[in-house]
Amino acid sequence: LELLEQIEAGGLIPDALYLCSGAYTHVGLVVAFKALGIELRVVGISPAPRDDAQAAAGHVELAEECAQLLQLQLDFSAEDFESYAAFVGADYGVVTEGSREAIQLLAREEGLLLDPSYTGKAMSGLLAHVRAGWWRAGQTIIFMHTGGTPALFAYADELGLE
């Protein structure tokens, strides 16, 4: 609800929302938007290696469980969960060239600190999608920063931070 209030206050009409998608945040947003009748493309970037189709099926199960607990009559399918593991790199927690670039770019240009395991890889995915032409000037993409900044200290050498 806070996110929706911020969108409304900013007069935004978002085309998509990007986030790191382990499972729960992604599922929770999709369930909430569906329950509220809001159509918003939620694009998850996985922090760990996985099969995207299997992840979507797992997200459906979690969403159905969540809806049942909340006593919501909602139906979900794999198409409700868009998630990509292509930006993970060698494994969970391993810095990729894309996450390093995203971390340095956002710190330098926006003063926004990302971590290498979650938000750095999610932003790497968003940047790759922009470069691939998925999004164009004039569209509104929301990036959900879910934390992880303390990890920067553990990865300082790998990230080229001084």
Image: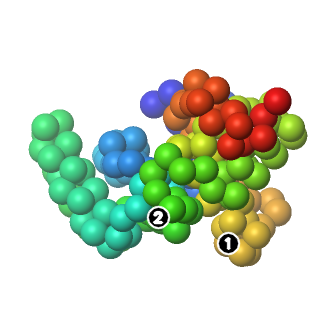
- The C terminus is located in which quarter? top right
Secondary element type, mark 2? loop
> Residue at 66% of width from left, 52% of height from top?
99
Tell me which label, 1 or 2, sits earlier in the chain: 2
**Residue 149 visible in image:** no
Q: Residues within 10 Å of mark 2 (few under 14, many from 20)?
A: many
> Residue at 51% of width from left, 62% of height from top?
90
Secondary element type, mark 1? loop
Left-right relation of 65 to 123: left
Q: Residues within 10 Å of mark 1 (few under 14, many from 20)?
A: few
> Residue at 71% of width from left, 49% of height from top?
100
Left-right relation of 143 to 37: right
Left-right relation of 71 to 119: left
Q: Position of residue 8 (x, y in %)?
A: 62, 36
Of residue 70 and residue 129, the one placed in the foreground of this image is 129
Number of marks in the rendered image: 2
Most distant residue in the front direction = 157
Q: Position of residue 114 (x, y in %)?
A: 65, 37
Of residue 31 and residue 35, the one placed in the foreground of this image is 31
Report the amino acid beneath label 2. Answer: Ala
Q: Which mark is residue 134?
A: 1
Q: Which residue is mark 2?
A: 85
Q: Position of residue 54 (x, y in %)?
A: 28, 69
> Residue at 72% of width from left, 75% of height from top?
132
Vertical order, 41 against 105 (above or below):
below
Vertical order, 32 against 46 (above or below):
above
3D distance between C-alphas at marks 1 and 2: 17 Å
- The N terminus is located in which quarter? top left
Report the amino acid beneath label 1. Answer: Trp
